[in-house]
Each structure stands twice: as C-alpha cells, then as structure tokens.
Image (cartoon, grey):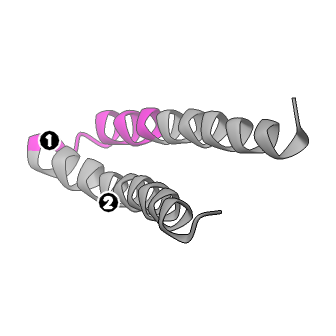
C-alpha cells in the first residue's frame, strides 16, 4: 500500500473517530448540565455543522479531482 493511500484512509478513519468522540462529549455535557431537550439540540446542531463542513469538503475535493483529471 502506498503511503498516500494509507494517509488518506487513516485521516478519514481517525477524523471519523474524533467526530464520534466529540459527539459523546457533547452528549455527556448536555446530560451533566441538564440542558434539556432544546439545549441538547442546540449543542448537537453546533457540532453537526462542523461535521457537515468536513463531509462537504470531502465531496468537493473528490469532485475537483474527478473534474481536473488528477
């Protein structure tokens, strides 16, 4: 396996693991602070926007590579 392929896979896997860990942290924070349903929704919305940005970036880069013929 070439180093570039390995780095690409590990980046995706490790960032996904980090996202799951951050979701757990937000859930635990909402539970311990007794944020309620609305507060928990706001916390997860903020985290979700960051995750959505990461996913969109991945698709945009893949689309640019296909279009550019790299």
Q: Nearer the viewer, residue 57 or 22?
A: 57
C-alpha gap between disc 1 and disc 2: 20 Å
Query: Which image quadrant is residue 36 in?
Result: top left
| Residue stretch rendered in magenta on the structure | 23-37
Q: Is residue 3 left or right of residue 38?
A: right
The mark nearer the N terminus, 1 or 2, is 1
Quarter of the picture holding the C terminus:
bottom right
Please check the rendered image and state whether residue 63 is part of the magenta-colored stretch, yes or no: no
Query: Which image quadrant is residue 8 in?
Result: top right
The residue tagged 2 is 49
| 3 shown above or below 50 | above
Residue at 80% from the left image edge and 36% from the top image edge: 6
**Where residue 52 sits in the image (x, y, percent)?**
34, 55
Residue at 10% from the left image edge and 49% from the top image edge: 38
Residue at 46% from the left image edge and 63% from the top image edge: 57
CB atoms of marks 1 and 2 within 8 Å? no
Q: Secondary structure at mark 1?
A: helix
């Amino acid at each position: 396996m070439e180093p570039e392929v390995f780095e690409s896979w590990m980046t995706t896997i490790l960032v996904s693991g980090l996202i799951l860990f951050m979701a757990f942290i937000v859930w635990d924070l909402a539970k311990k602070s007794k944020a309620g349903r609305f507060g928990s929704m706001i916390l997860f919305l903020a985290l979700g926007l960051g995750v959505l940005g990461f996913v969109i970036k991945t698709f945009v880069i893949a689309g640019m590579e296909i279009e550019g013929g790299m």
